[in-house]
Image (tube, grey):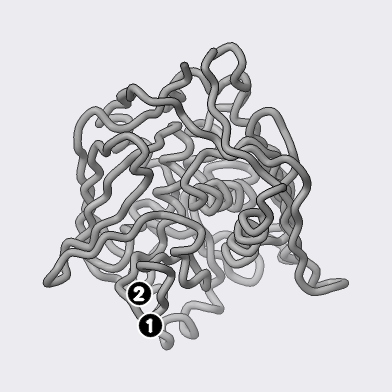
Amino acid sequence: MLRQRTLKSLTRAVGLGVHGGQKVELTLKPAAIDSGIVFRRTDLPAPVTIPVRADTVCDTRMATTISPDGDPGGPKVQTIEHLLSAIAGLGLDNVAIDIGGEEVPILDGSAASFVYLLHSAGIALQDAPRRFLRVLRPVEVREGEGATLKWARLEPHHGYRLSFEIEFNHPALDATGQQVTFEFSTSGYRRDIARARTFGFSKDVDMMRARGLGLGGSMDNVIVVDDTRVLNAGGLRYDDEFVKHKILDAIGDMMVLGKPLLASYTAFKGGHALNNRLLRKLLADASAYEIVSFEREREAPSGLAEPAPAW
């Protein structure tokens, strides 16, 4: 039987939220079978539990944000996508997350620090079948047309593959790889994806900070690009780091399904909002997917039978 996975022990991190700039402590803990990924706001007078599901997503501007029942006026946890990407990358099903603030720490701007934390806590197999959401027929969402067109699609695939293409028409971004395909069964998440950092444009910094955003951002956790070049002294970690960060985000955004996907995801110029629309459209059509498990590990797609190595 292909079994569910949680952490062997708890692990902690402290860092700044990239938008609010507030110091936040995060505790990642083992969780019970079938409990999924659940955040708990421990800084509130009465702690509030927020499960990670497509319908608890309440905001997708700049990041993915969840709240109880998706209520935009309720207690929130923001910028969950990098942590969820790491959880998906290591093949975890059940994790309890205590958070002492509204925003997941940005750490170095990628998922690599979260991968390290999760790996250091260890992965434990649980005595219950791992349940996957298998896409049965194509589902697509589109927005805009011509130069403003963007889209995202899920299609049947015996495994989990993601493909993303960017188009920014910017000298620094155009000089890097514009398209990446990542296959979970044959690639190393930590090696190929996890170190890709979030990025932003220097011309947008003042506007964002006037809106109370990006207050915790710096060149320690964001790739900063001016009109022509990358400003970070160390340059890029990958030749195609920009598009790989989009893959990293998409892995995290797909994880709000609450179950690992068996599908091929493809997107062009997409983002958090389009990803959540795609998931809601998928879940609205019961004929488009099914929940499956594998009694025999050899029946599972290649690469999914064993806990993913961190590096």
Say the numbered circle drawn on residue 212. Answer: 1
**Residue at screen point 42% across, 23% down:** 3
Whether tag 2 and tag 1 are in contact, CB under 8 A, the answer is yes
Task: List x then y, in percent, for residue 278.
Answer: 66, 59
| Residue named by callout 2 | 215
Task: Report the residue that reaches farthest toward the bottom.
Answer: 210
Task: Report the residue that reaches farthest toward the left.
Answer: 45
Q: Quadrant of residue 143?
A: bottom right
- Distance between mark 2 and mark 1 Cα atoms: 7 Å
**Residue at screen point 71% across, 47% down:** 288
Secondary structure beneath dot 1 equals loop
Examine the rendering and report whether any part of residue 165 can be seen.
no
Examine the rendering and report whether any part of residue 100 can be seen.
yes
**Residue sitting nearer the eye, 6 or 17:** 6
**Residue at screen point 64% across, 59% down:** 284
- Which kind of residue does numbered mark 2 sit on? Leu
Image position of 298 with respect to 10: above or below: above
**Residue at screen point 37% across, 57% down:** 220
Image position of 181 with respect to 299: above or below: below
Task: List x then y, in percent, for residue 156.
Answer: 74, 38
**Residue sitting nearer the eye, 302 or 135:** 135
Task: Report the residue that reaches farthest toward the front.
Answer: 286
